[in-house]
Image (cartoon, rainbow, N blue to C red):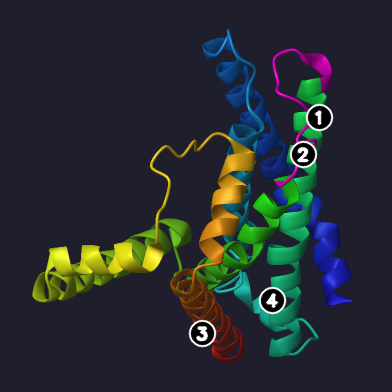
Amino acid sequence: MLILKELKEFPLSYGLSVLSAAGVYVLIMALAMLNGIAHPVGIFFRMTMISLLIVVMMVVVPSKMYGYVNHYKKGIYYTLLPASAFEKMLSMLIICSIVTGLVSFSILVLTDYLVYALFPCRLAGTLFGEAGSVTFFSSEIFSVVMFQACFILGNLYYKKQKIAKTIVFLMFLAVIFGVISFIIITQIGEEVVTAFLQSKMGDIPSDVNYFDLKKMNDLSDSLRQLPFVRIMVLVDYISWSVIGIGCWTGSYRLIKTNKY
């Protein structure tokens, strides 16, 4: 019942933001078509823009939908809802991650098809007309959902300027991680680290075309065959899992223990 209630509130609370994202995408396509008169807008560029807009939508939705839950007055209403803290957390994850992701993706893809229908000569084929398009999107789902967990926690922890403060905190962590990495590399020796990576990564083509989707997918498939890259991918998944589970656990505790 809580999920149904929040689904009904979703169009009113967040519908305009989704439509705004579609409008931004149309503006980006218009600028791309004007700047590249001699060449049609490529699929890789369009998928990248859609991915970036989806990330923005996923980051913004927690504060848009649930920005009031820790408000000193409005939050009392959320606390008195006849649902447990776990049910509230579960509903929040479904709305923020699954519903927002699917709705944003569907609207932006439909917008792209509409632009293609109006200007077929200015776009290089349909969005999913090239092999590897589905792989491109599916490979980023996990990390985006885990990244969003940071903003769900930030929304429940901070009282004001929730998104800005969360971004500043994440930048602070990134700086600390960068300084630690720099110190480690300096102690080991840059030449030693470079030689080690080259020996593990093998021969990587230097003329990589980052705008050719097929070549990028072929390169990704080739790299994933390397044992070192497989280990790094596994470490990446484990790291994001720890971050996501940690943020969700913290969000659950905040929902359960928040005082007004």
Q: Secondary structure at mark 1?
A: helix
Q: Position of residue 77 (x, y in %)?
A: 70, 75
Question: Residue under circle 4?
Answer: 78
Q: Earlier in the sequence, mark 3 or mark 2?
A: 2
Q: Amino acid at mark 3?
A: Gly
Q: Is residue 164 left or right of residue 54?
A: left
Image mark for residue 79: none
Please tell me which residue lies in front, 7 or 179. Answer: 179
Instruction: State the predominant SS element of the stretch in magenta.
Output: loop
Q: Give how far apart the Cα atoms at labels 4 and 3 are.
A: 23 Å
Q: Secondary structure at mark 2?
A: helix
Name the residue: 54% across, 75% down.
237
Q: Is residue 2 left or right of residue 254?
A: right
How crowded pointer 3 is (Cα within 10 Å; few <14, some 14-19, many 20+) is rated as some
How crowded pointer 2 is (Cα within 10 Å; few <14, some 14-19, many 20+) is rated as many
Image mark for residue 113: 1
Is there a contact, CB below 8 Å, between mark 1 and mark 2? Answer: yes
Please tell me which residue lies in front, 23 or 204. Answer: 204
Q: Is residue 122 magenta?
A: yes
Q: Amino acid at mark 2?
A: Val
Q: Amino acid at mark 1?
A: Tyr
Question: Residue under circle 2?
Answer: 109
Q: Earlier in the sequence, mark 4 or mark 1?
A: 4
For the N terminus, the image quarter is bottom right
Residue 162 in sight from this viewpoint: yes
Name the residue: 40% across, 55% down.
203
Please tell me which residue lies in front, 200 or 213. Answer: 200
Q: Which residues are the magenta region?
A: 117-132
Q: Earlier in the sequence, mark 2 or mark 4?
A: 4
Image mark for residue 246: 3
Q: Amino acid at mark 4?
A: Tyr
